[in-house]
Amino acid sequence: MEIIRTENKLREKVLFSRHYPIYLGDTIGVTSHYQRLHSHDALEINMIKSGTGYYMINGERYDFKEGDILLINSNDLHCAYETDNLVMQVITFDPSWFIGSLRCDPDILCPFKEMGVYFNNLLDRNHPKIESLRSLLLLVQEEHEAERRSYTSIVYAHLLQFLVYVNRFFRLNNPKTNKSTIPAPQLEKMRIVTEIMEIRFAYPWTLEELAALIYLSPSRFSDIFRRTVGMSPLMYLIHLRLENAYTLLESSDRKIVDISMDCGFRSLSNFNRLFKRHIGTEPRNIRSKANTSCSKIVLVIERLSGEIEVE
């Protein structure tokens, strides 16, 4: 699977194989990339194999634990965070794979098309049919990894059955009328701000300057941003700076003080303090690792109180 950014920096286009348009694998924790607010044109299914965490999806928070199943629609603005020893099965697929089935069953993709109205992103963990869904997802993964003869057809068949079961058993009897959901225009404003922050992460932003980008008061902007992303704007800025610093520490031999300045930290002592607080080790220890698999930054927001200074 290949992911490319479109002109909208938060909107990802997923490139699949034409004959087998699916990606499937387990993730350990949540890499820094997926802690950023983003959306993509593919459909996604997540099953939590162990641990806990939460998703922010279109301004709603969904806490998940072992056994939970989540559906993420194309264009859903979302980001994920780990809180404890998370292992998650991730299935991403091209909806056009099911064009043939749509001819005889036009409702097959309703769990995604009617998401937020007749379906929830987090499926009911107490539903009697949830175990059947878990079993189907494990069968999909077993076939995908074994690659036995005609495995692509069996993966398709199991995934098709999964969608049928969700559509049949998990559809809400009454449409949702959740007044706390953030309106689409406000989500778009948050998308614009986070995109600017990603591009200009080293700039010494103030809350007032960020709010002014989308013509909101600082208090209103801060409230909507926190509800959309799951953290304050200044905390998100720290996240972006630490992620870029982590990458530079891994991939270059530049001085740590130069990296800290280029990533927007005004002093080395402040950089060292924030780095250790959020990542759990000192910057110099990143380079001492012989084999680093990924730039994983786990931000456990619940451990922190109040706003964090960005200096």
Image: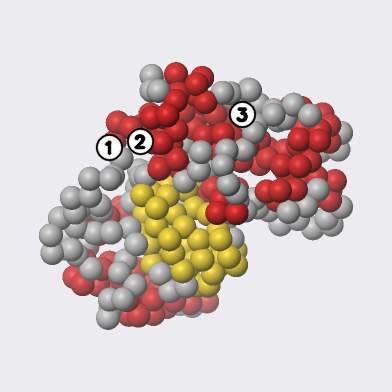
The image shows residue 155 at horizontal and vertical percentages of 39, 71
- Please say if the residues under marks 2 and 1 sit with CB atoms less than 8 Å apart: yes
- The residue lying at 79 percent from left, 41 percent from top is 272
From what the image shows, is residue 69 above or below residue 208? below
Left or right placement of residue 147 versus residue 103 in this view: right
Q: Secondary structure at mark 3?
A: loop
> Quick one: SS at disc 1?
loop
Q: Amino acid at mark 1?
A: Pro
Tell me the crowding category of disc 1: few under 14, some 14 to 19, or many 20 or more residues within 10 angstroms, Cα based. Answer: few
In what quadrant of the picture does the C terminus appear?
Answer: top right
Residue with the mark numbered 3: 201
Q: Looking at the image, can residue 106 be seen?
A: no
Q: Position of residue 11 (x, y in %)?
A: 43, 38
Q: What amino acid type is highlighted by mark number 2?
A: Leu
**Residue 187, numbered circle:** 2
x and y percent of residue 231 in the render? 50, 43
On residue 183, which mark appears?
A: 1
**Residue flagged by tag 3: what amino acid is it?**
Phe
